[in-house]
Image (tube, rainbow, N blue to C red):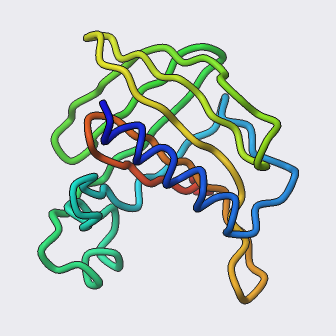
Amino acid sequence: MKKVLLLLLLFILCFSFSGCIDNTPSIANTNWKMTSIQSGDDGSIIIAGSSEEQESYPSADLIDMICRFTESEFSLTNNTKVETWTGTYSLINDDHIKSTIYGLVFSGGKTGHAVCGITTYADGSQEDKLIISVEGYALNFVMKTE
């Protein structure tokens, strides 16, 4: 549990220092594409969400995963292995660091957190980001535009 909280705090700090702006994206009715899964132990990328990401981390497995939020429920779907995890979510905080934090409860009883915001890069480009922290892992997503 300490690792999950530490990981969540790390991501909150990342969003606060990465140039997030006031217009946080809506988490509901949005499709999110997984870019990577990181280990909470050492921060290594263990799963890549695209062949481009896997080129940067050759030891990472390649998995196609999406996340979808409705008004109060969410689903994570691993299209590679045809697995789906579902649960509910609730708002925790949306007014301190220009990102929104949600509490997650998976159908099996596991809990986690999600942080949603907009990251602005050094070149001025922006990207909607979602980070799910659960059981010592960070699942990184971008808003799916396809």
Q: Extreme bottom residue here? A: 123
- Residue drawn at point x = 73 percent, y = 72 percent: 120
Residue 141 image offset from top left, x and y in percent: 48, 53
Residue 35 image offset from top left, x and y in percent: 41, 61
**How many badges with numbers are in the image?**
0
Q: Quadrant of residue 63?
A: bottom left
Q: Extreme right residue here? A: 22
- Residue drawn at point x = 51 percent, y = 47 percent: 9
Q: Can residue 116 be seen in this view?
A: yes
Q: In this view, does 58 lie to the left or right of 27?
A: left
Which quadrant of the figure contains the N terminus?
Answer: top left
Q: Is residue 76 left or right of residue 129?
A: left
Residue 100 image offset from top left, x and y in percent: 70, 38
- Residue drawn at point x = 52 percent, y = 53 percent: 11
Residue 122 image offset from top left, x and y in percent: 70, 86
Q: In this view, does 73 lie to the left or right of 99?
A: left
Q: Extreme front residue here? A: 2
Residue nearer the viewer, 105 or 1: 1
Q: Quadrant of residue 76?
A: top left
Q: Is residue 143 visible?
A: no
Q: Is residue 27 left or right of residue 146?
A: right
Residue nearer the viewer, 32 or 129: 129
Which quadrant of the figure contains the C terminus?
Answer: bottom right
Compared with residue 133, is residue 18 higher up or lower down, i.e. above or below?
below
Q: In which quarter of the image is residue 50?
A: bottom left
Compared with residue 81, is residue 46 higher up or lower down, i.e. above or below?
below
